[in-house]
Image: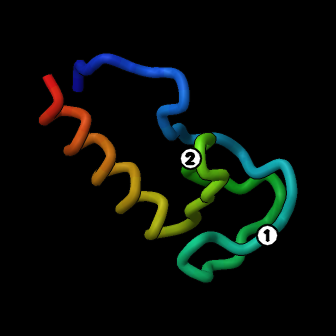
Amino acid sequence: MAYTRYKGDPYWTRAKTSGTSADGIPFEKGERVFFYPRSGTTYAGDGASRASAEFDELAALEG
């Protein structure tokens, strides 16, 4: 999808440390996660895919 990217937009990355996502799913260091830099919220597993899809839908509506 083509939409304007802004500083602070969430993005896919590899976890730097182990932890628990916002929806309670544990993740390990090095696992692919979806990260919201403004709030520091991290999503892993199926929750990450849903968060990414939701962000893409909302970003597409902007333009």
- Residue flagged by tag 2: what amino acid is it? Tyr
Question: Does label 2 or label 1 sit earlier along the sequence?
Answer: 1
Measuring 28% from the left and 41% from the top, which residue is drawn there?
Answer: 56
What element does badge 2 sit on? strand
The image's mark for residue 60 is none
Q: Is residue 51 left or right of residue 18?
A: left
Instruction: Tell me if residue 60 comes above or below residue 30 in the rendering.
Output: above
Question: In the rendered view of the protein, which quadrant contains the C terminus?
Answer: top left
Percent position (x, y) of residue 57? 20, 44
Mark 1: give few (<14), some (14-19) or many (20+) Cα within 10 Å. some
What element does badge 1 sit on? strand
Instruction: Tell me if residue 6 comes above or below residue 25 in the rendering.
Output: above
Separation of residues labelled 2 and 1 (CA atoms) = 15 Å
Percent position (x, y) of residue 38? 59, 42
Question: In the rendered view of the protein, which quadrant contains the N terminus?
Answer: top left
Mark 2 vs mark 1: in front: 2
Percent position (x, y) of residue 8? 54, 31
- Residue flagged by tag 1: what amino acid is it? Gly
Measuring 48% from the left and 33% from the top, which residue is drawn there?
Answer: 9
Mark 2: give few (<14), some (14-19) or many (20+) Cα within 10 Å. some
Instruction: Tell me if residue 23 comes above or below residue 44 in the rendering.
Output: below
The image's mark for residue 36 is 2
Measuring 25% from the left and 35% from the top, which residue is drawn there?
Answer: 59
In the picture, residue 6 is in which quadrant? top left
Measuring 71% from the left and 45% from the top, which residue is drawn there?
Answer: 14
Asked whether the beta carbons under mark 2 and mark 1 sit within 8 Å of each other, the answer is no
Task: Say which residue label 1 marks.
Answer: 19
